[in-house]
Image (spheres, rainbow, N blue to C red):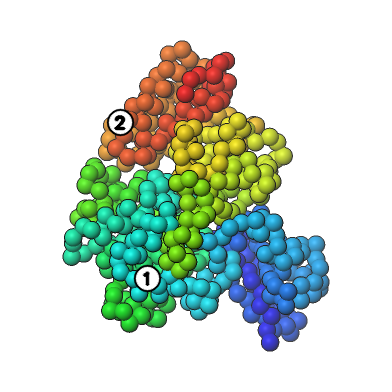
Amino acid sequence: MSIKIYVPSDSSSVSLGADKVAASIISEAKKRGIAIELIRNGSWGLYWLEPLVEVSTAQGRVGYGPVKPSDVTSLFDADFINGGTHALSLGLTQEIDYLKKQQRLTFARIGKTDPISLKDYVDNDGYRGLANALSLSQAEIVKAVTDSGLRGRGGAAFPTGIKWNTVLNTPSEQKYIICNADEGDSGTFSDRMVMEGDPFVLIEGMTIAGLAVGATQGYIYLRVEYPHAFEALNAAIDSAYKEDYLGENIKGSNKAFHLEVRLGAGAYVCGEETSLMESLEGKRGLVRFKPPLPAIKGLFGQPTVVNNVISLASVPIILDKGGEHYRDFGLGRSRGTLPIQLAGNIKHAGLIELAFGITLREILYDFGGGSATGRPIRAVQVGGPLGSYMPESQFDTPLDYEAFAAIWAVLGHGGIVVFDDTVDMAEMAKYSLEFCAIESCGKCTPCRIGSTRGYEVMDDIINGRDLDKNIPLLRDLCDTLLNGSLCALGGMTPYPVLSALNHFPEDFGINEKAGA
């Protein structure tokens, strides 16, 4: 009987040498005449330990990491294939604190299974949600999602059930499901981890969404920078068609749903739902005026559900366990779990799935282990490049949409980028305006002109020129962007700029804190 050895195949692990480690293990096992089965799983999200090699033993899967190709010979010498002790030993993977303290619902299989094995997926509770959905009416499926309290995980946090209900009750011969997989925010990688590590959960979630609202066609709009996800998704979609989980007659139900992946072309603004639909229609990615809402008149003018990857990947467990089960996690109006991504100057970078309510401080220190440099953490940016910069005084804020909104911050996609006390916050504000200027679609004047003018003003401020004039001018520009922009790209750029100015005035040459 061959020994099962797991080496991650996701792009982050590959970038750290996982392919070379896998090849070295195969070569060394062959040289020693040891029969192994090498399984390329997804990453558990403990990226400071990648490549993390696991061996299946009678006690469970034993981990070793981070493993380099040069470590492989000594691992075999230490009898790692039977869980032997080595300098890189981590013990049982499931007992690692970082993983053990999580509440993994959406990410329950990621790291555990072969991502493109349909058998693995089904053997680990996959497609149970779809099986239940096939026995329910459309209204009952929508009710389960509504009862769960699931809100959009892409940033706006709009209740998913309300969106689905609108599409369900809008008459049309053709409806669509779109998965917004254009994950462009800095410091975010949860969508990529799902698509590379458990693509079937997204496919199942989109299929359930199609059944719920009467949509027969779905599209995954994937950012072009994710070639590993593109490959995994297409392989999984092919398997789903072969086994009748997709197609004209899903598992003999006479219900149809078709799915395909479409690649974006690297435009950040196409993460905005109406710009994304323009791109899908073969047009330039420009933001549409609203109303009409996409739920009424979306792709090709038809009612369309547009949800983020994590939103749709959360649906299968809701239909499997029930809306109440999912709603029991979290607090207030923030229900369920959130995949939190830790990046930047942090010791233990990676992904953590937890119920809403944990504080930033707990995430940064109990999971993240503090800064990678060992210096004090001065600021964190939560919610991507358009999220607010939060100072140490706000680290006790619980992860909750309303709690963040109350302090003029955004939770967004759950990405957290960490900065130590060497960061220049005026430079970070300047970067935010530069980012907006580069990524603006140019359709509306506040975003197109305001971001460029703001970048110029920030350059003057950083160089100490006319602060009495330029600080108020910066605030005026931010007010125009906030209230006059057509979409969230321009409308949210003031969040990082003003939060940096308000919380770190000394970096702008201001001696006294300005008002919010």
Q: Position of residue 130 (x, y in %)?
A: 40, 72
Residue at (40% x, 75% y) in the render: 131
Residue at (30% x, 69% y) in the render: 137
Name the residue nearer the viewer: 182 or 427.
182
Q: In which quarter of the image is residue 79?
A: bottom right
Q: What amino acid type should be assigned to the residue bearing mark 2?
A: Gly
Name the image quarter holding the N terminus: bottom right
Q: What amino acid type should be assigned to the residue bearing mark 1?
A: Ala
Residue at (70% x, 73% y) in the render: 60
Circle 2 sits in a helix, a strand or a loop, which is it? helix
Residue at (22% x, 53% y) in the render: 296
**Residue 30 shown left or right of residue 477 in the figure:** right
| Residue 484: image tag | 2
**Residue 490 shown left or right of residue 429 in the figure:** left
Q: Where is residue 502 in the image (x, y as percent from the top left)?
A: 51, 24
Front: mark 1 or 2: 1
Work out whether 227 lies above or below 512.
below
Report which residue position mark 1 lands on.
Answer: 133
Q: In which quarter of the image is residue 221?
A: bottom left
